[in-house]
Image (spheres, rainbow, N blue to C red):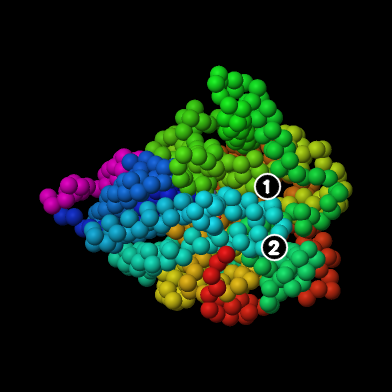
């Protein structure tokens, strides 16, 4: 898991700690609990003991979680649930024991450590042991359902099943309207069976949160930002208001292109919204795959990283075929083995390419164990969770990534993202366990993405991933569009997921309206809608990893804004002059030194202080993002001149509430 927000075990995806939690505590009394606190312990002694015990318990939990993510079956699910149960129980005990110190004088480090202990988990567990066990069991089950999810058609010998990777490939590459609809609806079938378990899950984590003194689990999530929960919610509104005009321009331009491609009756849905299945991505959170439709100037220099990666794969295949001469192997077996070897080799090269960026800043190479234990490609002999994640197994150097890497630009940038988590973990490994975490969870998500902003056309050319770029206005607009399709398109999505969960946790969204509320928020923020009604027979939130995995999502919204602040600061540190979007701090040791200094702070002080050290500001600020995209925003305004931009969300709400249609 990552940790939910402050703690950081495995960070990126959220396994362990997300599953972990901190409830109100079992209130053990001395002599009755095997884990009773020593009498007369000082706050500092308590924190030192928890730091020691936590390293042990969380390492066991992470191992169980790693196994259940990389070998999904009923046995690993059971083992992971049991490990989580032990962890959650222990966490509740520590939190109960910490109550002794309320109002007591203590060192600032002890005070911060105890504060972080109470906010460590996204999954606060009830004190009742049976309920706690049930929560752990549901959490493992939901993750397993997502990880092993597939969509099958046909029957008997004609039955074929496709997983998330195969279904997403259709959205990425096919421009066949019906094939995309089938792949989108097909993947969303995995959500429906989760509804009952998810409903119970919400009841249980809310009970845990209340026992800890929070109004509900959502309020607890909003409490991890060194400000009040209300102030935090207000900050996210403020930031969204600042970036929304840019998103609306991108939305308007995109709608026009989809209309041109599919016809107005199919390119948009009622109210001027974008059809959910046509955006190149299951959740419409990243529109990069629509480059063939949205490229501003198709002839102004190619930024086709996919082609270079595909060529690398083919070269690896050729080499593997040449050296695979096991006697007695059929030609097709040889071909198959060479294909697998080539996939692994290409994935490893992509990881090395990303590592090279970090080492160019002066950071160390990844430990040997990383290369041995990382899951690079999808195994063929078992189910695995393919959603990318980064893991810090033992808080002292056993770091790994779990991915199912394909030779695509999307996966290359995800690798850079994941290595951001890994280098953050390594940098703060020198802190005591309770302070090992991001300054806030948005920081954790922003580290690698800041590096991605430095992957300018010049950088990509310098490492042989694209041809030497043109220096024209058209090439600039292309480069900006390439970034905007992932970074700007993402912004409202980054917000709406937790708008939904905050409502679910506070009871304003009830189970009988789960899906309707989901689509109402998608309409309101993203301006996207399904083309057929998605009533309450569906549970579409379950088809997005972070819902069954219970990973808070506002972190990604924050990260998408913060990363431009980090980027600007590091560009300044590297001595960059000129427009922000031209900067790459690749190879700059001063930028690396400043970055590492920030990473090493971990969670040891309020994030505002950490942000100030790097950027000079203690507020999250959308201005660097807007500065970066200023040329594109001007260009979009020209393109959209005369259009009526924006959308009306009314139609979607009505459609979602209507009678559900069967998928397929
Ligand atoms: O989940 C992730 C990472 C792991 S932390 C792969 N991301 C979000 C997502 O995929 O929805 C990165 C971008 C947003
Ligand atoms: Zn991440």
Q: Is residue 513 left or right of residue 471?
A: left
Labels 1 & 2 near each other (Cβ < 8 A): no
Q: Secondary structure at mark 1?
A: helix
Q: Quadrant of residue 330?
A: top right
Query: Is 84 located above or below residue 638 in the figure?
Result: above
Q: What residue is at 52 percent from the left and 53 percent from the top? A: 159
Q: Is mark 1 within 8 Å of ligand 1?
A: no
Instruction: Look at the numbered disc 2 and give the secondary structure of its residue.
Output: helix
Where does residue 260 sit, x and y in percent of width and height?
80, 66
Residue 455 visible in the displayed image:
yes
In the rendered view, tell whether residue 639 sits above or below residue 472: below
The numbered mark, 1 or 2, whose residue comes first in the sequence reads: 2
Quarter of the image where the C terminus is located? bottom right
Neighbours of disc 1 within 10 Å: few (<14), some (14-19), many (20+): many
Q: Position of residue 187 (x, y in %)?
A: 55, 59
According to the image, label 1 marks what residue?
A: 453
Q: Is residue 588 magenta?
A: no
Magenta stretch encompasses residue 58: yes
Residue under label 2, please give it. 177
In the image, the segment drawn in magenta is 30-59
Which of the pair 71/128 is nearer the observer? 71
Please state which of the two labelled residues, at mark 1 or mark 2, is closer to the viewer: 2
How far across and how far down the image is residue 277, in percent? 64, 63
The residue located at (79%, 55%) in the rendering is: 295
Q: Residue at x 46, y 69 (%)?
A: 502
Residue 159 left/right relative to 240? left
């Amino acid at each position: 898991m990552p940790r939910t927000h402050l703690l950081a075990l495995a960070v990126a995806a959220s396994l362990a700690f997300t599953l972990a939690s901190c409830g109100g505590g079992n209130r053990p009394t001395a002599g009755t609990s095997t884990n009773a606190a020593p009498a007369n312990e000082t706050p500092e002694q308590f924190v030192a003991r928890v730091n020691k015990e936590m390293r042990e318990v969380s390492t066991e939990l992470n191992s169980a979680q790693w196994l259940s993510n990389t070998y999904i079956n009923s046995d690993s699910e059971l083992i992971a649930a049991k490990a989580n149960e032990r962890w959650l129980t222990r966490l509740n005990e520590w939190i109960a024991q910490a109550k002794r110190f309320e109002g007591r004088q203590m060192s600032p480090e002890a005070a911060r450590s105890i504060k972080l202990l109470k906010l460590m988990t996204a999954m606060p567990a009830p004190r009742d042991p049976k309920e706690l066990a049930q929560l752990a069991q549901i959490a493992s089950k939901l993750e397993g359902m997502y990880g092993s999810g597939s969509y099958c058609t046909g029957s008997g010998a004609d039955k074929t099943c496709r997983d998330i990777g195969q279904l997403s490939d259709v959205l990425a590459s096919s421009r066949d309207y019906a094939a995309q609809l089938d792949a989108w609806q097909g993947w969303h079938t995995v959500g429906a069976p989760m509804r009952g378990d998810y409903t119970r899950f919400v009841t249980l984590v809310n009970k845990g949160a209340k026992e800890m003194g929070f109004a509900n689990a959502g309020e607890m999530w909003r409490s991890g930002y060194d400000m009040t929960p209300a102030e935090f919610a207000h900050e996210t509104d403020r930031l969204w208001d600042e970036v929304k005009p840019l998103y609306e321009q991108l939305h308007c331009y995109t709608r026009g292109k989809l209309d041109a491609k599919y016809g107005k009756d199919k390119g948009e849905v009622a109210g001027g919204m974008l059809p959910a299945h046509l955006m190149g991505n299951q959740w419409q959170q990243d529109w990069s795959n629509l480059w063939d439709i949205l490229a501003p100037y198709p002839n102004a220099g190619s930024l086709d990283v996919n082609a270079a990666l595909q060529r690398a794969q083919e070269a690896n295949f050729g080499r593997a075929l040449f050296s695979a001469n096991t006697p007695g192997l059929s030609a097709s077996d040889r071909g198959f083995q060479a294909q697998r070897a080539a996939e692994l080799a290409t994935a490893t090269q992509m990881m090395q390419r990303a590592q090279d960026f970090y080492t160019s800043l002066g950071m160390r190479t990844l430990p040997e164990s990383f290369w041995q234990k990382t899951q690079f490609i999808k195994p063929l002999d078992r189910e695995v969770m393919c959603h990318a994640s980064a893991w810090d197994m033992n808080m002292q150097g056993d770091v790994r990534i779990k991915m199912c890497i394909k030779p695509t630009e999307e996966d290359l940038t995800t690798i850079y993202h994941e290595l951001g988590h890994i280098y953050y973990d390594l940098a703060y490994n020198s802190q005591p366990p309770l302070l090992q975490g991001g300054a806030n969870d948005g920081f954790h998500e922003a580290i690698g993405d800041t590096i991605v902003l430095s992957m300018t056309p010049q950088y990509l050319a310098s490492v042989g991933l694209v041809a030497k770029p043109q220096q024209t206005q058209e090439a600039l607009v292309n480069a900006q569009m390439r970034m905007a399709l992932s970074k700007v398109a993402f912004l409202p999505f980054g917000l709406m997921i937790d708008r939904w969960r905050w409502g679910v946790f506070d009871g304003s969204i009830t189970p009988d309206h789960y899906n309707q509320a989901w689509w109402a928020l998608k309409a309101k923020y993203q301006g996207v809608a399904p083309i057929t009604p998605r009533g309450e027979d569906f549970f579409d939130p379950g088809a997005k990893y972070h819902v069954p995995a219970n990973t808070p999502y506002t972190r990604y919204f924050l990260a998408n804004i913060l990363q431009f602040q980090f980027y600007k600061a590091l560009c300044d540190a590297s001595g960059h002059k000129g427009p922000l979007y031209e900067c790459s701090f690749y190879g700059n040791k001063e930028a690396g030194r400043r970055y590492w200094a920030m990473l090493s702070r971990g969670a040891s002080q309020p994030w505002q202080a950490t942000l100030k050290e790097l950027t000079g500001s203690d507020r999250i600020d959308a201005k660097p993002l807007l500065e970066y995209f200023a040329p594109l925003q001007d260009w979009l305004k020209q393109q959209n001149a005369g259009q009526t931009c924006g959308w009306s969300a009314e139609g979607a709400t009505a459609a979602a509430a209507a009678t559900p249609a069967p998928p397929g």
